[in-house]
Image: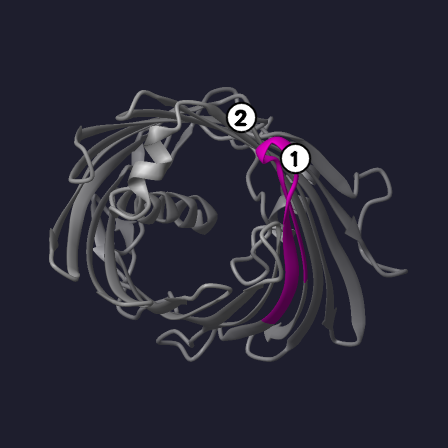
């Protein structure tokens, strides 16, 4: 079972860990020994048209994020997410009348600790994911879940719950004049869980994963250049103690340029994801597939912002995401997104952020057209 959303979240955490080490940001992050709470509402809806028939996928998600700095080196982060996903089918669709068209609940609780072994130079991180979310789905719920697990649609919450997980990582950075070099690694251990209610025991265990990251940055006055490479190696997934499948190694290359002026800001990036061939159990050994079933990924975007006043900023974003054909000439998809938003600084350090987006594209080698709307509201509250 390939869980792209989980991998993306863990990859972004690695990038965040590197960013915490950058001198111009890290001191401000750690000097303020207080608690910051981010409370958000995410709305996503997609209209999917295939063979002249339309269906609607909608999700409401309420993620909660808390961070607390203890002194200048130690920081605690806690995240929780609730979601409800709704499936709206066309008249005459083959769906049992007794089966639900929605599923929801709370997600797993994630706790992360980071400690600066050497301030702005060396950071150690550890994480724990507690299985508080629902993981054992009924057969009808699993049918709905499959609708919301598309990597192209990128719903905020895919799987609500999984097994107990733990991670540990080390990230370092060295500055040489305008050049910064960073690197590190991490290990994520995953526990077994019941993916379906009909299972009497926790029979599915996703493979553990190893991650390595290397980053080079160059600062030139108001312009920053940065290139990052992240490698992810997976162990085999197990079903009832037996190895069945191993996802191929994944390489992500991210290149970006950013500009920060007095009032205006801008950044552009291009990100490529290279996925190696998977392995499947044949006889008593895992054998690599002859052709690569996984397609390569390509993503690019442009972000701009303008500060209207000390307390208000407007911004816009254009993004294009594409999945290339695999070795069988299948699996192509693409989606383009435009987003507009604003951020307002309120009293006592509170901040309100509102964004709206429109997306359009296709999946399954242009056989399925997709059109989506999204909105996000985030309230940041320091205490």
Q: Residue furthest left?
A: 176
Q: CA distance from mark 1 to mark 2?
A: 52 Å
Q: For the magenta stretch, what is the residue range?
A: 337-356
The residue shown at (35%, 45%) is 16
Q: Nearer the viewer, residue 300 or 180?
A: 180
- Taking the image as shown, residue 129 lies to the left or right of residue 21, namely right
The residue shown at (86%, 43%) is 97
Q: Nearer the viewer, mark 1 or mark 2?
A: 1
Residue 203 percent location from the top left of the image: 42, 27
Residue 46 located within the stretch drawn in magenta: no
In this view, 169 is above or below 154 = above
- Taking the image as shown, residue 174 lies to the left or right of residue 194, namely left
Q: Which residue is mark 1?
A: 347
In which quarter of the view is residue 80 placed? top right
Its colouring scheme is one colour
Query: How many residues crowd around disc 1 within 10 Å: few (fewer than 14), some, or many (20 or more)?
Result: few
Residue 376 percent location from the top left of the image: 67, 50
Q: Check disc 1 and report its element: helix, strand or loop.
A: helix
Q: Which residue is mark 2?
A: 199
Is there any visible trace of residue 376 in the rendered image?
Answer: yes
The residue shown at (39%, 23%) is 33
Residue 287 percent location from the top left of the image: 22, 55
């Amino acid at each position: 079972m390939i869980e792209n959303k989980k991998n993306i979240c863990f990859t972004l955490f690695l990038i965040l860990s590197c960013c915490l080490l950058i001198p111009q940001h890290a001191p401000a992050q750690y000097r303020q020994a207080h608690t910051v709470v981010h409370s958000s509402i995410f709305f996503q809806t997609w209209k999917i048209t295939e063979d002249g028939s339309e269906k609607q996928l909608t999700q409401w998600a309420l993620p909660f994020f808390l961070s607390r700095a203890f002194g200048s080196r130690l920081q605690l982060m806690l995240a929780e997410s609730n979601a409800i996903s709704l499936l709206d089918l066309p008249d005459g669709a083959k769906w049992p009348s007794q089966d639900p068209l929605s599923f929801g609940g709370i997600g797993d609780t994630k706790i992360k600790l980071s400690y600066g072994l050497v301030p702005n130079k060396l950071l150690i991180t550890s994480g724990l994911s507690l299985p508080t979310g629902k993981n054992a789905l009924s057969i009808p719920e699993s049918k709905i879940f499959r609708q919301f697990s598309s990597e192209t649609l990128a719903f905020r919450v895919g799987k609500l719950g999984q097994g107990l997980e733990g991670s540990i990582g080390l990230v370092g950075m060295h500055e040489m004049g305008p050049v910064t070099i960073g690197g590190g690694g991490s290990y994520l251990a995953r526990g077994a869980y019941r993916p379906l209610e009909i299972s009497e025991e926790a029979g599915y265990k996703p493979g553990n994963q190893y991650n390595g990251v290397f980053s080079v940055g160059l600062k030139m006055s108001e312009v920053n250049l940065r290139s990052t490479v992240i490698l992810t190696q997976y162990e085999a997934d197990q079903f009832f103690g037996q190895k069945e499948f191993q996802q191929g190694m994944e390489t992500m290359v991210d290149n970006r340029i950013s500009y920060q002026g007095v009032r205006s800001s801008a950044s552009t990036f291009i990100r490529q994801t290279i996925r190696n061939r998977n392995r499947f159990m044949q006889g008593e050994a895992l054998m690599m597939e002859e052709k690569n079933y996984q397609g390569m990924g390509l993503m690019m975007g442009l972000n701009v912002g303008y500060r209207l006043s000390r307390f208000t900023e407007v911004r816009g974003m254009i993004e294009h995401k594409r999945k290339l054909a695999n070795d069988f000439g299948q699996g192509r998809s693409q989606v383009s997104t435009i987003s507009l938003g604003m951020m307002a600084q309120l009293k006592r350090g509170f901040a309100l952020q509102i964004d709206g987006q429109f997306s359009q594209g296709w999946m399954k080698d242009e056989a399925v057209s997709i059109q989506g709307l999204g909105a996000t509201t985030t309230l940041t509250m320091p205490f």
